[in-house]
Image (spheres, helix red, strand yellow):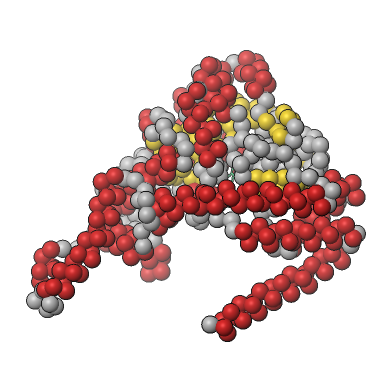
Amino acid sequence: MNTENFQLSERLVNTAYVRQGSQGRRAHELRLRILLEQGKCPEDGWDESTIELFLHELAIMDSNNFLGNCGVGEREGRVASGLVARRHFRLIHGIGRSGDISAVQPKAAGSSLLNKLTNSIVLDIIKLTGVKTASSCFVVPMATGMSLTLCFLTLRHKRPKAKYIIWPRIDQKSCFKSMITAGFEPVVIENVLQGDELRTNLEEIEAKIQHLGADNILCVHSTTSCFAPRVPDRLEELAEICMKHDIPHIVNNAYGVQSSKCMHLIQQGARRGRIDAFVQSLDKNFMVPVGGAIIAGFSDSFIQEISKMYPGRASASPSLDVLITLLTLGTKGYQQLLKERKEMFYYLASELKRLAEAYNERLLETPHNPISLAMSLKELDKRSGTAVTQLGSMLFTRQVSGARVVPRGSVQTVNGYTFKGFMAHTNNYPCAYLNAASAIGMTKEDVDVFLKRLDKCLKAQKKGLNNGEALSEMKKEVISDIEESSMSEADTKNEI
Ligand SMILES: *Cc1c(COP(=O)(O)O)cnc(C)c1O
C-alpha cells in the first residue's frame, strides 16, 4: 500500500488505526531500504513476513506479472502449474541475458535486482568469513564441479597454448572430471605423508612447472576442504609459485566457507601470491538444496569474464534460495551456525578419539584439517580383507550417512586415469580408516547417535559376527530404535 491508498483507507477505518498499520508496514520497508542502500547481509535475520513481502515486490516488477502484459515472444515466463509458480515466488524469468549471467534482463527488473542483491550479499558473507579482500563474486546455478569447469574454460582463451592443469591429488571424482570436461589433461601431483597428514608436494609442483613449461600449463588447481588425512593444500606457497611463474591459480573451496581456517588460507594466498578464482558450493556451506555455487575472486574483470562465459540465461533458484536463507539467518545467525559447527568438530574429535582407543585404534593426527576427521581401522583390517568394507555397509544399514570407510589398496579408473589407493588421496596410505566430518548444521545428537551406532558395529565385528548375522541383528535394532523413537514421540504428544 502506498500513501494514497492509506489515505483512502482512512475513509473506511479509523484514522489512528490506519496510521498504526502504515507504520507497521514502514518497519518492514525500512529493512528493505537498508538492504538496497548497503547491499549487505542484515545483522539480524528477517522474519518470514518481511521476506515474503520483499519477494512479492520483486515478482511484480517482472513482465510476466504485469497486469496488462501481452507476450508475443518465444519466452514469456508462462508456467502451466500454479504450484510451480508459487514454488518460485512467481519469479519465472531466471537470471542473466543471453551473453552474460550477471547482466540485467529487460523483461525482468525484479529478477535482475534479486540477482544483483544476492551476489552483493554473498560477497559480504565471503568477506565476513575471512576473505576480506575478495572484490567480486557471482552465484552460478551449477554445482561446484561444473563451476570449476567454467573457470577453466574461461582461462583457455587467455592461454591458448596450455593443455595441462597441475592438480595436487584429491580423490573426489568431480574435481577430476571438472578438468577433463573442460578438455584439459590433469597432471596429478601425489601428496606427501607428514606424520599422519597428506600434504601438498611443493617441490614436485615446481619441478613439473619447469619440465612442462609455464605456457603449457593452464593453471594450478588446488583444494582447501577435503577428507582427512589429506589436509588443505599449502595455498600460500602455491599462490607464490603461481605468481612467480605467471600461472593462474583456481582454488576448489567446496565446503570451505564454513571454516575460518580455509577462508584464512585463501586470504593469505591472495595476499602473498596469486589466486584468480575460488569456488564454493552453496548447499555445503549455506544449507540450501544442491544446485548452485559461488565463483569469487580478487579481480572484477576476471570474475566478469567468467560470468560472460556462461551461455544463455540461467535458473534463479539457487540465488533465490541463498538470498532467502541469508535474510532469514542474518550475519548473526550464520555466524552462530559456524560457531556451533566448530564446537561440534571438537566434540566429535574428542568422542571419536575415545571410541577409537577403546578398540585399540586411534584418531589420526590431522591438525590442519578443520572439518574432517579420520579414525584408523587397523584391527579390522588385520582381521580380514573385507572387514573394513563390511563396516561401511553395516553403518549404511544402520542409517549412518556420510561416514566413509577407506580400505587400503582400492584401485579406480576415472576417465582412463588409474588411481591406486583411490579414496585415500595417495597410493599407499599406511592404514585403513574411517572418516567423519563436522559440517554446518550438525547437531550434538547427530554426533551421539553416530558414535553409538559405530560402537555397536565395531562391537559386532569384534564378536566376529559374520556380515549376515550382524546385519540381521542390526536390522532388528534399527527397527527397535525407530519404534522406540516413534513411541517416545507419541509419549510426548500424549503429555502435551
Ligand atoms: C563436493 C565436492 C566437489 C564437487 O561438488 P559438486 O557440487 O557435486 O560438483 C568437488 N570437490 C570437493 C572437495 C567436494 O567436496
Query: Residue 180: x percent and y percent?
Result: 60, 35
Q: Nearest the camera: 385 or 97?
A: 385
Residue 108 visible in the shown view: no
Residue at the location (47% across, 37% down)? Answer: 130
Q: Is residue 261 toward the left or the right of residue 108 in the image?
A: right
Establish if 455 lies above or below 308: below
Residue 445 position, x and y percent, is 63, 62
- Using the image, determine if residue 468 lies above or below residue 250: below
Percent coordinates x, y for residue 480 in the rendering: 74, 74
Residue farthest toward the bottom in the current orientation of the protein? 494
Percent position of residue 408, x then y? 81, 42
Pick the quarter of the image with the N terminus: bottom left
Q: Quadrant of ligand 1?
A: top right
Nearest the viewer among 407 and 362 is 362
| Residue at point 72%, 51% (across, down) | 352
The image quadrant of residue 374 is: top right
In-front residue for pair 261/273: 261
Q: Residue at x 37, y 31 (%)?
A: 300
Task: Name the residue rendered at 70%, 30% in the picture.
Answer: 191
| Count of numbered circles in the view | 0
Task: Classify residue 481 by image quadrant.
Answer: bottom right
Q: Quick check: 58 above or below 233? A: below
Judge whether residue 29 can be spotted in this image: yes
